[in-house]
Image (cartoon, rainbow, N blue to C red):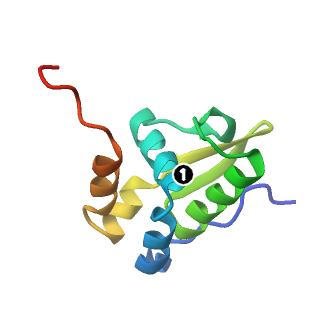
């Protein structure tokens, strides 16, 4: 049994699907947390204000849109931001989304 879920290739990315995935604030938060961490994260490591089953849905939407890649390490499902692939398909989009989602630094910091 294959434990790694299917992921779209770059040439299969749909701008409509990516934008629909990013319209939700929980999914934008997942993307921003992955971007800030710059490392794979287990599903349970995210700071999310939703139930586990709802979080699972959000991860699936992001994966199916091509924004994240998921794989298992032991029993943990790990998530990787596909920033290079997104940049190839839609230059500047992910950078703009993450910038808009990240609070500005305090003045004088």
> How many dots with numbers?
1
Q: Which residue is labeled 1 in the image?
A: 26
Who's the residue at 66% across and 61% down the image?
60
Between residue 18 and residue 84, name the one nearer to us.
18
In the shown orientation, is residue 49 left or right of residue 81? right
Residue 61: percent from the left, percent from the top? 61, 65
Tell me which residue sits at (73%, 46%) in the image.
51
Q: Is residue 11 above or below residue 77?
A: below
Residue 70 x/y as whole percent: 63, 52
Q: Quadrant of residue 97?
A: bottom left
Q: In the current view of this chain or complex, which residue is farthest to the right?
A: 1
Q: Name above or below for residue 57 compared with residue 8.
A: above
What residue is at 46 percent from the left and 63 percent from the top? 22
Q: Say which element carries label 1.
A: helix
Q: Which part of the image, by quadrant, shows the N terminus?
A: bottom right
Q: Which corner quadrant holds the C terminus?
A: top left
* Image x and y of residue 102, in percent: 33, 41
Residue farthest to the left, as pictured: 108
Task: Using the image, determine if residue 17 lies above or below residue 101.
Answer: below
CA neighbours of label 1 inside 10 A, class few (<14), some (14 to 19), many (20+): some
Measuring from the top left, give residue 54's x and y in whole percent: 71, 54
- Front residue of 106/46: it is 106
């Amino acid at each position: 049994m294959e434990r790694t879920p299917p992921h779209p290739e770059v040439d299969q990315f749909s701008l409509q699907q990516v934008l629909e995935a990013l319209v939700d604030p929980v999914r934008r938060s997942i993307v921003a947390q992955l971007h800030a961490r710059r490392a794979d994260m287990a599903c349970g490591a995210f700071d999310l204000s939703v139930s586990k089953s709802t979080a699972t849905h959000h991860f699936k939407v992001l994966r199916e849109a091509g924004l994240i890649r998921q794989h298992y390490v032991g029993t943990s499902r790990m998530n990787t931001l596909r920033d290079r692939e997104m940049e190839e398909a839609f230059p500047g989009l992910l950078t703009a989304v993450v910038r808009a989602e990240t609070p500005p630094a305090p003045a004088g910091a």
